[in-house]
Image (cartoon, grey):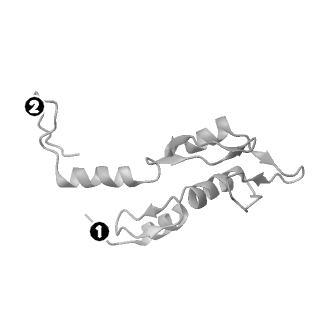
Amino acid sequence: MSQNMAYYNDGYNHDFTDEDAMRLVRIAASPEYRPHTCRWIDSGTACDGVIQGLYFPTHMRECHSIFVVGQDSPRFQCQWEGCSDTTLASKDILMRHIQERHLLWRWNCPNCGMVFLGKVSRNAHHALCGVSNK
C-alpha cells in the first residue's frame, strides 16, 4: 500500500492508488484466496463444503481420511467425485493433484502474467522472467 496514507474521519483511505487496487485484484484472483467446493466422496456422498484455498489442505486432513492402498509402500487414493486417478505416491502429491486437477488452480507469473498449470512450473519460469508488469 502507499507509504503516505491519509486517513479521514470517514474510515476510508483516500490515498489508495491504482497500483494498490491492482495488487488487491491479483491477491483476490489467486487460488489461495478463492473459495472452492470440495467434491471428496465420503460414504457415497460428495462433501460440498466451500473452503478458501489456503485452508483446503486443513479441510482434507481434518474432515476426510486419506486412504492407504498398500502396506509396503503407502499409496494414497483420490476419492474426488469422478476421478479415475486411483493411487498417488504421497499426501503431498495427492494434495497437488486435487489443487491442479480438481480445483483447477492456475499460477500467474507476477512479472509477465503468463499462466501455468502448476506452481513448480510458474516458480521455475518466474526465476528467469525479466519482464516487469508494473
Secondary-structure class at tag 1: loop
Residue 132: x %, y % from top left: 29, 68
Q: Is residue 74 left or right of residue 50?
A: right
Does 56 appear above or below 97?
above
Q: Is residue 12 left or right of residue 23?
A: left
Which residue is at a point 48% across and 66% down the rendered structure image? Answer: 122
**In this view, the mark in front (2 or 1):** 2
Numbered label attached to residue 8: 2
Q: Residue furthest top?
A: 9
Numbered label attached to residue 132: 1
Which residue is at a point 48% across and 64% down the rendered structure image? Answer: 123
- Which quadrant: the C terminus? bottom left
Residue 133: x %, y % from top left: 28, 67
Badge 1: how crowded within 10 Å, few (<14), some, or many (20+)?
Answer: few
Numbered label attached to residue 50: none
- Pick the residue in front: 100 or 5: 100
- Which quadrant: the N terminus? top left
Q: Quadrant of residue 111?
A: bottom left
Badge 2: how crowded within 10 Å, few (<14), some, or many (20+)?
Answer: few
Which residue is at a point 43% across and 47% down the rendered structure image? Answer: 33
Secondary-structure class at tag 2: loop
- Pick the residue in front: 124 or 51: 51
Give the spatial CA distance, label 2 vs label 1: 34 Å
Q: Amino acid at mark 2?
A: Tyr
Which residue is at a point 36% across and 51% down the rendered structure image? Answer: 27
Does 119 appear above or below 23?
below
Does 121 appear above or below 25?
below
Residue 42: x %, y % from top left: 72, 42
Residue 107: x %, y % from top left: 46, 62
Q: Amino acid at mark 1?
A: Ser
Q: Residue furthest front?
A: 45
- Pick the residue in front: 87 or 109: 87
